[in-house]
Amino acid sequence: MCGIVGYVGGRDASKVVLEGLKILEYRGYDSCGIATFDSELEVRKDRGMIDEVDSGQRFLEMKGTIGIGHTRWATHGPPSRENSHPHTDCTGEIAIVHNGIISNYLELRKSLADRGHTFTSETDSEVLAHLIEEQHADQGLEEAVISALESVEGSYAVLAVSSREPGRIICARHESPLLLGLGEGECFLGSDISAFLGYTKGLSLLMIWSMLWLIGAAGL
């Protein structure tokens, strides 16, 4: 079963996210990856065990105080670097991680390809990055995610970041679990509370019941 971790605050995001992914190893997976934002969006990922992938990708060298990560158990598309999360859009400005099943992804993928989008994976999840890309052309990231999800059928817990809006993670869920931990000037996200349990002392822990929450370092 796939796992999701997200962080925004003042700590090194790669460290927090990597620790969370290692805690979620019990869920089983075949690949993993992390996206962070410092001066630009950076994505590192590959198939294999976390320690093995980390040895090659050196996750802790990734800079920034905002990050999202994912451990994948293959459903659509075999285990591979290309099918690992996070997925990005055509511009390289947006990165997403996703748990769940997008049941109408073939229809969405064909429609997006007909409109000129280029896909780099065989997953159902990648369509989310491209749907958000289209909406983000003239909308903020929050509005773009809301608009993109209106065409999606199935289940999802999704985290999205954009280099155009640094310091923010947009998260949404439908049927798939997602938890939010609110700290002093920081937020933690996980598909399981154990992903950030070591940081939860004094945190407000919330189940994300509504479809969409906006998370930002500013204004916490």
Image (cartoon, rainbow, N blue to C red):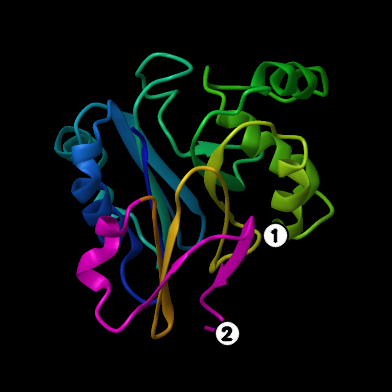
Horizontal and vertical percent for residue 37? 47, 58
Query: The disc labelled 2 sits on which kind of residue?
Result: Gly
In magenta stretch: residue 208: yes
Up/down of 220 relative to 8, above or below: below
Q: Give the magenta-colored segment's residue range.
A: 192-220
Query: x and y percent of residue 104 in the render?
Result: 68, 22
Q: Residues within 10 Å of mark 1 (few under 14, many from 20)?
A: many
Between 137 and 124, which is closer to the camera in this rendering? 124
User: Which amino acid, mark 1?
Assistant: Glu
The image shows residue 121 at horizontal and vertical percentages of: 52, 21
- The mark nearer the N terminus, 2 or 1, is 1
Against 22, residue 113 (above or below) is above
SS state under label 2: loop
Please provide percent x and percent y for residue 188: 39, 66
Q: Which residue is rendered at x = 76% and y = 24% of the image? A: 112
Residue corresponding to mark 2: 219
Q: Residue at the spot x=38%, y=21% of the render?
A: 74
Residue 183 in the figure: left or right of residue 131: left
